[in-house]
Amino acid sequence: MIMPKKNPKRNPEHLARMTRKGYIPPQNSESFPAQYPTRLLHKTLEHHMDILQNMEFAAIQIYRLHPDLVDVDVIHAYNALFAAYSDPLFDSEKERKMLEILPETACAMYDVVRQMGEWRFVDDDDRTKAGTSHLSGDARKILKDCVACLLDSAKFWHARNGSTGYLEYVDQFIH
């Protein structure tokens, strides 16, 4: 059997084979808008690992308090955070309306992960504000990229290991 050339840009057959095996997330994935190519996710992982770890730590703390939590709740919370950081005009009224439709555990996850992510970007006076309007544009972009990585990870481990696959996978690294 002749193997295709390994440069995915030049050989779509190789790209399709790698995508099926899960090595490269598909570019047309429903996880994110088209502006989140694989290289941006990897760059975010390299440069903001500390923020990602803090946010996942917060998620696992909620999981340990609510053992009935499932990956779908986490994915809903991450989707809500992605929407919040994508909208520069996101305010407490939009946040309230969005949280009304989420399950209670997803709301708890949203709140704790948001607070942990924003912790390093705001001063003490802004920590109690609801919404994300107090964040700078750079902070909003960094957090949006981080949530995109978390969302990708949650969807991957959920698909691979079932209803609590993501939570159980991350939980093994948090002591």
Image: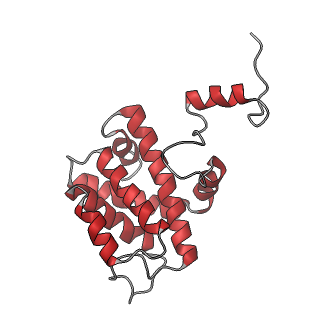
Q: Position of residue 42 (x, y in %)?
A: 62, 51
Say above or below: 155 vs 114: above
Q: Residue at x 27, y 68 (%)?
A: 97
Q: Residue at x 37, y 64 (%)?
A: 113
Q: Is residue 54 left or right of residue 138?
A: left
Figure quadrant of residue 90: bottom left
Residue 122 lies, in percent from the top left, at: 45, 82
Instruction: Tell me which residue sits at (53%, 80%) in the image.
Output: 136
Q: Left or right: 91 with respect to 101?
A: right
For the point 37% across and 71% down, which residue is it?
A: 115
Quarter of the image with the N terminus is: top right
Query: Vertically, is 3 above or below 152?
Result: above
Residue 52 place in picture, x, y as percent: 48, 59
**Nearest to the observer: residue 153 or residue 53:** 153
Q: Is residue 96 above or below residue 150?
A: below
| Rendering coords of residue 96 (x, y %) | 27, 71
The residue furthest bottom is 125
